[in-house]
Amino acid sequence: MKKKVCLVTGGAGFIGSHMVDLLLAKNYTVRILDDLSGGHIKNIKHNLNNKNLSIEKKDITKISTTNKIFKNLDYVFHFAGKGDIVPSIENPKNYINTNLFGTVNILEGCRNSKIKNFIYAASSSCYGIAKTPTSENHPIFTLYPYALSKYQGEQATFHWSKVYKIRSNSIRIFNAYGPRVRTTGVYGAVFGVFFKQKLAQKPLTIVGNGKQKRDYIYVTDVADAFFKLGKSKYDRQIFNLGGGDPKTVNYLANLIGGNKIFIPKRPGEPDCTWADIKKIKKKLKWKPTVSFEEGVKEMLKEINNWRDAPLWNKKNIKKATKNWFKYLGN
């Protein structure tokens, strides 16, 4: 029986690399497209000798839509893109270019090769400061260019699906966490910030009063949801993906351990993110399997992976988020 072939864009990144793990474990042939600007070879190093894996190191905005990587594909899982709020405020054109036009470029590759199964990794940031729990039909309210660009990528996905008959679906991810979560120099991801602070025996910097809640979802559960959606027969459907059980930042800090200091609350950030996951549980027969406590425990086992991450403190956080307050503070 011929192996199914999958393309994972951003396959050397945080979520993408776990998607690659899952697909290889299920004996799929996997092609990775990643320019390694955000992803890392170390995330897929353990798979590099697998004969079912290949990687193309190219930018999604520049790869030819007739590239052989698009030939004879059964599924495309599209994770590639730019993340983070502050850089999107400072360089909005870069985000629109990658997250919208890069997505369009991949969709054109699918159109040229008559690929019929495209799964888009969207962001719950499209909801802005939302009513909770947040369902898929909640009004869209994009507060910063990152959120806008990811939503526009989703809209392009559904437009190409409608016009060119590419069966496409989207998952709006809430707060994904787990091994390989980003450790770049940009201030943002809470786990990278806290883990480095703990390693350096410095206090954990808590935004606001720490009572704000986030709907965390473990990365292997994210990959499982994408796999189930890829195998489904749905078309132009949106699914919210979270744990459905928000936790406070203070609770996360307590699980990690250490002293705390508090820094000013940021404008444009919700007090609570909370995915209504009834739809994905019912239609895909999916549910989260890794509890928050288990997930944090697993990550702490690998805390030394964050030894080279940047160390954040009150002073350099204030500098890094200056434009956040400038543009979102109105």
Image (cartoon, helix red, strand yellow):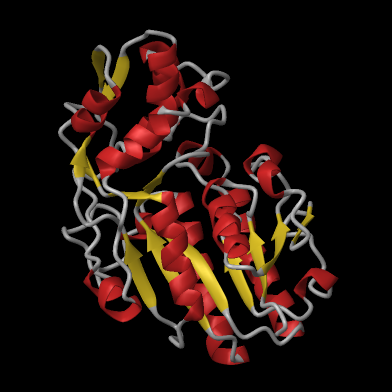
- Residue 326 visible (yes or no): no
Q: Residue at x 76, y 81 (%)?
A: 72
Quarter of the C terminus within the rendering: top left
Horizontal side, residue 65 vs residue 125: left or right: right
Relative depth, front residue between 117 and 165: 117
Horizontal side, residue 287 vs residue 193: left or right: left
Q: Residue at x 76, y 83 (%)?
A: 112
Looking at the rendering, which quadrant does residue 232 occupy?
Answer: bottom left
| Image spot of residue 213 (x, y percent) | 20, 42
Relative depth, front residue between 125 and 36: 36
Vertical placement of residue 321 versus 102, above or below? above
- Residue 139 visible (yes or no): yes
Quarter of the N terminus within the rendering: bottom right
- Residue at the extreme front: 1
| Image spot of residue 147 (x, y percent) | 43, 54
| Image spot of residue 307 (x, y percent) | 53, 18
Vertical placement of residue 92 versus 179, above or below? below
Q: Residue at x 38, y 15 (%)?
A: 198
Relative depth, front residue between 68 and 161: 68
Vertical placement of residue 101 versus 202, above or below? below
Q: Residue at x 26, y 49 (%)?
A: 215
Vertical placement of residue 139 versus 79, above or below? below
